[in-house]
């Protein structure tokens, strides 16, 4: 099924990724999962999640869907291929959420995250963006209503009173400028709950929000945020309700978003050097991260390039390529020592037919 599956695109991206970040066993597992997903899921983004403090070169696979009608169609196609193999699983939820998105809108994007080394590598963790397009993000009662409507589908079980109360409390103390840009559930893992992802929040605003929630990790998170301010440029916050507030906190870190390539590379170098100094990243992986970004195209591997992209390029007179970049980092803090991960994005692009 490789010619019509995501695997062909994933294999091309993996060719240019240092094995220090994604080793041979992880590559095999990732391609195995991608072989079950439709080829159209190369757009708008797919990518990989890599732990940084260990020499183990394991990685997970992430794929996205965005915009109507393409996004719901891709999700529906993925679910249709796997729901018969995994009935009463998260694939049934993907199918129903895709139908809801297609018919009613109200969602901005969707991500599937696969724990390829976990006990259920073909079952996805689910994330969606509340809101749609350029509309203001849902807040307050509107967002709470969406959680009541879609939360049971997201988590796979009814929301209990404690979950609703926890979410309501979080909304009550959310800073005015902050917004929830994703809601998720780690469906491939044993626990159940909702992951709330908050952006338009600043490094000094994260400890204040945690203080308002009486979060036990506030002092550790405050220390980390103070260290991050000089070396990073933007952040987002992940909190888990399961159903009470989890003691673990995720801080998404963005380095030089939107800056010219030279400025971005300089800032990324400074950040990965900081990670290595803090022993949150091995030196070998820090060097591999700086070798990750780049562009490959069909001319580099014409025989192995995804056939559907070769055919589409011939039809429109363009050249298919994959642009690689570091999307963001995540630092996790809580009862355990801090951990760091990198999220590596791959974006399909159309280039001029001839390479100059």
Image (cartoon, rainbow, N blue to C red):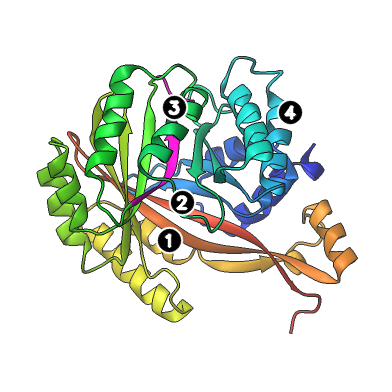
Cα separation between marks 1 and 4? 34 Å
Q: Earlier in the sequence, mark 2 or mark 4?
A: 2
Q: Viewer-proximal residue, 118 or 152?
A: 152
Residue 242: x, y in percent? Answer: 32, 24
Contact between marks 3 and 4 (CB within 8 A): the answer is no
| Residue pictured at 46% horizontal, 51% vertical | 21
- Residue 81, which numbered label? 4
User: Which region shows up in magenta?
Assistant: 179-190
With 40 as the anchor, is 157 left or right in this view?
left
Which residue is denoted by mark 3 in the rendering? 148
Q: Viewer-proximal residue, 265 or 155?
A: 155
- Residue 272, which numbered label? none
| Residue pictured at 60% horizontal, 31% vertical | 97
With 177 as the anchor, is 305 left or right in this view?
right
Q: Viewer-proximal residue, 165 or 31?
A: 165
Which residue is denoted by mark 1 in the rendering? 289
Q: Is 85 placed above or below 282 here? A: above
| Label 1 secondary element | helix
Q: Earlier in the sequence, mark 3 or mark 1?
A: 3
Q: Earlier in the sequence, mark 2 or mark 1?
A: 2
Q: Earlier in the sequence, mark 3 or mark 2?
A: 2
Cα separation between marks 3 and 4? 28 Å
Neighbor class of circle 3 (other Cα within 10 Å; few <14, some 14-19, many 20+) is few
Contact between marks 2 and 1 (CB within 8 A): the answer is yes
| Label 2 secondary element | loop
Tell me the quarter of the image containing the C terminus: bottom right
Cα separation between marks 3 and 2? 39 Å
């Amino acid at each position: 099924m490789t010619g019509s599956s995501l695997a062909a695109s994933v294999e091309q991206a993996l060719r240019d990724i240092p094995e220090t970040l994604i080793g041979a066993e992880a590559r095999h597992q990732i391609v195995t999962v991608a072989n079950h997903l439709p080829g159209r899921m190369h757009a708008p983004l797919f990518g990989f999640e890599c732990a940084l403090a260990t020499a183990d070169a394991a990685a997970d696979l992430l794929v996205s869907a965005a915009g109507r009608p393409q996004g719901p169609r891709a999700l529906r196609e993925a679910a249709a291929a796997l729901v018969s193999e995994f009935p009463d699983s998260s694939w049934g939820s993907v199918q129903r959420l895709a139908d809801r998105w297609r018919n009613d809108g109200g969602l901005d994007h969707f991500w599937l995250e696969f724990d390829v080394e976990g006990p259920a590598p073909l079952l996805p963790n689910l994330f969606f963006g509340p809101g749609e397009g350029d509309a203001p993000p849902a807040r307050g009662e509107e967002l709470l209503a969406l959680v009541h409507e879609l939360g049971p589908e997201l988590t796979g079980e009814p929301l209990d009173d404690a979950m609703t109360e926890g979410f309501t409390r979080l909304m009550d103390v959310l800073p005015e400028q902050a917004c929830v840009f994703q809601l998720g559930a780690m469906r491939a893992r044993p626990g159940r709950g909702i992951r709330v992802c908050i952006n338009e929040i600043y490094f000094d605003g994260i400890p204040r929000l945690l203080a308002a929630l009486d979060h036990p990790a506030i002092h550790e998170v405050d220390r980390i945020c103070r260290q991050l301010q000089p070396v990073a440029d933007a952040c987002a916050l992940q909190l888990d309700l399961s159903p009470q507030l989890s003691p673990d906190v995720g801080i998404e870190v963005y380095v030089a978003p939107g800056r010219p390539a030279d400025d971005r590379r300089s800032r990324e170098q400074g950040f990965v050097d900081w990670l290595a100094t803090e022993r949150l990243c091995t030196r070998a992986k820090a060097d591999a991260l700086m070798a990750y970004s780049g562009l490959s195209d069909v001319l580099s591997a014409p025989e192995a390039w995804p056939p559907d992209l070769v055919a589409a390029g011939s039809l429109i007179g363009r050249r298919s390529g994959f642009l690689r970049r570091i999307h963001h980092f995540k630092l996790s803090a809580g009862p355990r020592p801090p951990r760091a991960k990198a999220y590596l994005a791959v974006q399909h692009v159309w280039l001029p037919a001839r390479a100059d």
